[in-house]
Image (tube, rainbow, N blue to C red):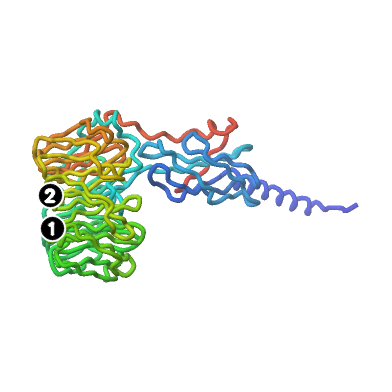
């Protein structure tokens, strides 16, 4: 038999007590972290945690619905368990909880649901189609009410998290999305004619002073600028760390997003005043020489080109499902094979359509023209007319936007319309004092530019869920809350 002295017994008791205290702290103070901490509905979210019982089973919830299961390792940790933000998750703060099935351990972290409209056309392909919108639809859009307005006449906006950016006059403005307070204003040396673009904490825009600018999105301070040979009317396209932008000097530029250094440029034979589009490694450029150029995004080499008609504008292309859709000043809408530029179909619209950018959604192409205020819905496969909407006789030249069964378009009659995508029926309209109003539609709101800037929302907008009590999740065992990170 081994004899233990009183001193040894005391030291052993202290060691046992220390282990117990450390274990209680480790297992009682769980933490959870999320990557990313926010994004649109259907976002993939990776959940990691620590401070759980070793080898314990842990239920993972988005709000109160279980979305995943984790098994802790020998240290009481788990990492990179994938869940999905529900398609129906409303904009705002939600909670991801990780609750141990047995014991007293649980923790939660916030996930912010938001959908960014961060450049012209919503996405690099300029489809104008917000596929994540889940608040505004054919039924609810009729309830839209003005939330606030900002007095500056404005260009088409972009929306990133809780901030709004747009050009007006010689300036770019940043507004707070909740109340329209001015966050900053940056004034260039010429007119800002097109929407800016946002990427990686920077705002990019072109100016009539021949420059392309990059600003810090939080402060509005200048990060870099690049001089072209003429006016920059085109809106920038930003994708994969590169800013693609065109100029009235006939050139298309690819610039490094971080410092504005030139990667390549390509010369067309006429000014380029509409934005290029991007899909599958190809940049599609509309020139006023009447030609669509398909350029390799990596080096600017020509893949193919297609001429609609000489000396006429082509609008910003929209690319979807391997097809390039573009409206032209020769009064036709074209559908081209995106890989080789062959003509798939063209549909006449009786008047120039180069001021209108097509939207592509639900198997249809939505586009306006100058022919007495007619707005068209065409079959994306054949170009046949599915329906027409006639406003009060003025041209329809604004870029349209589509979200959740509703297409939004501004007319030269100063009205902004919300139409049913399946029938063309008017669901809602708002009269401005500006021509060709255009909008971004996201997060249950319509951000409209006209004679001034308007924001519309639904009345009684539902608040995002409060943090669910950890004791209400899982098997019903009461659990101790831990720390949260995101």
Residue closest to the eye, 45 or 340 = 340
Q: Where is residue 462 in the image (x, y as percent from the top left)?
A: 34, 31
- Judge from the rendering whether residue 295 lies leftward or rightward of residue 432; answer left or right: right
Residue closest to the eye, 344 or 394 = 344
Residue closest to the eye, 363 or 101 = 363
Quarter location, residue 423: top left
Q: Is residue 73 above or below residue 138?
A: below
Residue drawn where x is 50% and y is 33% of the image: 469
Q: Where is residue 32 in the image (x, y as percent from the top left)?
A: 51, 46
Q: In this view, does 48 lie above or below 209?
A: above
Q: Position of residue 48 (x, y in %)?
A: 53, 49
Residue drawn where x is 16% and y is 37% of the image: 416
Residue closest to the eye, 373 or 204 = 373
Q: Where is residue 243 in the image (x, y as percent from the top left)?
A: 28, 62
Q: In this view, does 274 lie above or below 382?
A: below
Q: Give SS at disc 2.
A: loop
On the question of residue 183 being in view, the answer is: no
Alpha-carbon span between mark 2 and mark 1: 9 Å
- Judge from the rendering whether residue 278 lies leftward or rightward of residue 330; answer left or right: right
* Mark with earlier residue (2, 1): 1
- Judge from the rendering whether residue 151 lies leftward or rightward of residue 482; answer left or right: left
Residue drawn where x is 28% and y is 34% of the image: 422
Residue 352: image tag: 2
Residue 312: image tag: 1
Q: Give SS at disc 1.
A: loop
On the question of residue 154 being in view, the answer is: yes
Dots 2 and 1: beta carbons under 8 Å?
yes
């Amino acid at each position: 038999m081994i004899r233990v002295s009183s001193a040894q017994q005391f030291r052993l008791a202290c060691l046992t007590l220390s282990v117990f205290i450390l274990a209680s702290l480790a297992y009682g103070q769980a933490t959870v972290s999320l990557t990313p901490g926010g994004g649109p509905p259907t976002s993939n979210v990776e959940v990691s945690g620590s401070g759980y019982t070793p080898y314990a089973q842990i239920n993972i919830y988005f709000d109160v619905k279980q979305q995943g299961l984790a098994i802790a390792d020998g240290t009481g940790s788990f990492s990179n368990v994938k869940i999905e933000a529900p398609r129906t998750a409303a904009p705002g703060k939600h909670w991801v909880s990780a609750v141990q099935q047995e014991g007293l351990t649980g923790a939660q972290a916030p996930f912010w649901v938001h959908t960014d409209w961060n450049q012209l056309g919503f996405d690099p392909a300029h489809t104008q189609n917000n596929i994540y919108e889940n608040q505004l639809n054919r039924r609810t859009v009729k309830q839209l009410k003005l939330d606030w307005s900002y007095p500056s006449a404005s260009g088409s906006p972009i929306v990133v998290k809780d901030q709004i950016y747009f050009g007006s006059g010689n300036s770019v403005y940043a507004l707070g999305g909740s109340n329209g307070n001015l966050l900053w204003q940056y004034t260039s040396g010429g007119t800002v004619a097109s929407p800016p673009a946002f990427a990686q904490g920077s705002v990019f825009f072109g100016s009539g002073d021949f420059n392309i600018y990059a600003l810090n999105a939080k402060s509005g301070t200048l990060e870099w600028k690049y001089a072209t040979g003429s006016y920059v009317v085109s809106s920038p396209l930003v994708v994969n760390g590169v800013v693609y932008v065109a100029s009235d000097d006939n050139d298309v530029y690819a610039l490094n997003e971080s410092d504005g250094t030139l990667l390549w440029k390509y010369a067309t034979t006429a000014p380029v005043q509409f934005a290029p589009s991007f899909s599958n490694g190809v940049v599609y450029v509309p020139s006023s020489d009447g030609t669509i150029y398909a350029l390799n995004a990596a080096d600017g080499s020509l893949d193919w080109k297609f001429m609609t008609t000489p000396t006429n504008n082509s609008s910003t292309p929209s690319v979807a499902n391997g097809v390039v859709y573009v409206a032209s000043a020769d009064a036709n809408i074209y559908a081209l094979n995106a890989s080789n530029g062959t003509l798939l179909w063209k549909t006449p619209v009786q008047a120039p359509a180069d001021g209108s950018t097509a939207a592509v959604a639900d198997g249809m192409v939505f586009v306006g023209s100058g022919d007495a205020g007619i707005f068209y819905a065409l079959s994306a496969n054949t170009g046949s007319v599915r329906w027409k909407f006639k406003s009060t006789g003025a041209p329809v030249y604004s870029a349209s936007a589509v979200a959740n069964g509703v297409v939004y378009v501004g007319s030269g009659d100063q009205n902004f319309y919300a139409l049913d995508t399946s029938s063309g029926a008017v669901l809602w309209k708002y009269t401005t004092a500006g021509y060709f109003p255009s909008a971004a539609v996201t997060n249950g709101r319509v951000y409209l530019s006209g004679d001034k800037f308007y924001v519309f929302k639904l009345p009684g907008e539902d608040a995002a869920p409060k943090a669910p009590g950890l004791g209400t999740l899982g098997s019903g065992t009461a659990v101790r809350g831990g720390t949260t990170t995101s």
